[in-house]
Image: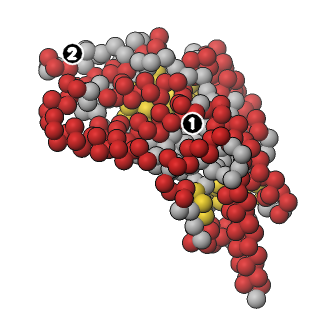
Amino acid sequence: MDADSLLAWRDEFPIVKTCTYLVSHSLGAMPARTAAYLQEYADTWSRRGVRAWQEGWWEIGRTTGDLLAPVLGVPPGTISMHQNVTVALGVIASCYTFSGRRRKIVMTDLEFPSNMYLFEGFRRYGADVVYVPSDNTVRTNLDRLLDAIDEDTLLVPLSLVLFRSAYLQNARAVIDKAHRVGARVILDVYQAAGTVPMNLEALEADYAVGGSVKWLCGGPGAGYLYVRPDLASEVFPGFVGWAAHANPFSFSTGPIVHAEGPERFQSGTPNVPAMYAARAGYEIVAKIGVQAIREKSLRLTRRLIEHARRAGYRLNTPTSDAERGGTVVVDVPNAEAVASELLRREVIIDYRPGAGIRMAPHFYNTESEIDHAMEMLDAIVAEITTTARG
Ligand SMILES: Cc1ncc(COP(=O)(O)O)c(C=O)c1O
């Protein structure tokens, strides 16, 4: 057993006893207490019925967002909860018109595809989507991105950590440039939240979006949207429903009177079961502290990198700690087939075309699991190479 105090949390994550679980960049392990919280949801619905709305369900978006606030480094009362990142982005986009001079949406060509698809859809309203080319698939070109952000720029969607390579972007530089020219930055923190410490308030991020499926171990259906408090009262989202009204139970007809606070960005009825499901992961990550998770993550990802280097595998991920999130991307010959065989042997990773095999240790993983996964990888690569030659 590794001498590592975070391993005390392993008992809370049943799946890690059954396989080598190295896929927390995709689906974080489920905490045992999530089952208890979901049972609590069912019991509340069953026993309290409609009274549950007054007993915590109606405000559950706000209270769940507040649990997340310390992980993102933002004040309470600034996060609203949504189905997923795409919906949160749609709410932000609906705060703007794209008719004046300032209608450019600037992002790099390595952004997550949904960030592109959503804003591509807003071309019909006048948005001018500009992609800044990268030199390779691992890193974006910061100078080129900063040059592209100008007085015509409205929004800059920026992943803090790139999904394909785990490259940790320089959000400070992008936010500073955007603010100098009057543009707003939407930080997509999905691949960072829960494994890379952040203080979005100090960073002066205008908006931040993310979800809970990955490092937060919170499961699907709990996307989040942070809006800088002074900006929140200046924008008037168009994609809103009755839950965003200042006085929803007045059921007043005609135009909305926007609520203050996170409810301003709500659509309709909150996704109550997803909020119950997300709670345990948020509590655990906040209790451990993202700084401690990061230290362990760097230790384990360095171990993966050292092994990959010794074996001569191509690394499609930055090797310097300062530039890397929580994932290591290893490319090997026949990577897709190798990934399938790893899965068959209960080493849980994933494969992305153009990148390779993504491996992501979290606070519940051990050094021996890293060694086991890499030994399996070596064995499978050798077997597949021999078969291909024969
Ligand atoms: C950086 C990033 N943004 C967005 C998404 C997708 O978000 P959603 O499915 O919540 O819309 C992902 C999912 O993998 C991601 O890695």
What amino acid is at disc 1? Gly
Residue 20 seen: yes
> Please, which colouring scheme is shown?
secondary structure
Tell me the quarter of the picture where residue 84 sits. Answer: top left
Q: Earlier in the sequence, mark 2 or mark 1?
A: 1
Residue 196 percent location from the top left of the image: 63, 34
Helix, strand or loop at label 1? It is: loop
Q: Are marks 2 and 1 in contact (CB under 8 Å)?
A: no
Residue 59 percent location from the top left of the image: 29, 25
Say if 29 sits above or below 248 in the image.
below
Residue 212 seen: no
Q: Which residue is mark 2?
A: 247
- Which one is nearer the viewer's eye here, 68 or 147? 68
Instruction: Indicate which disc residue 344 carries.
Output: none
Distance Cα–Cα, label 2 vs label 1: 34 Å
Residue positioned 71% across, 78% down in the render? 384
Q: How many marks?
A: 2
Q: Which residue is mark 1?
A: 194
Q: In the image, 156: left or right of 281?
A: right
Tell me the quarter of the picture where residue 290 sits. Answer: top right
Residue 274 percent location from the top left of the image: 35, 41
Residue positioned 56% across, 22% down in the render? 73
- Which one is nearer the viewer's eye here, 317 or 303? 303
Residue positioned 80% across, 58% down in the render? 307
Residue 302 percent location from the top left of the image: 77, 47
Q: Quadrant of the C terminus?
A: bottom right
Say if 38 sits above or below 346 in the image.
above
Label 1 packing within 10 angstroms: few (<14), some (14-19), many (20+) = many
Label 2 packing within 10 angstroms: few (<14), some (14-19), many (20+) = some
Q: In the image, 50: left or right of 16?
A: left
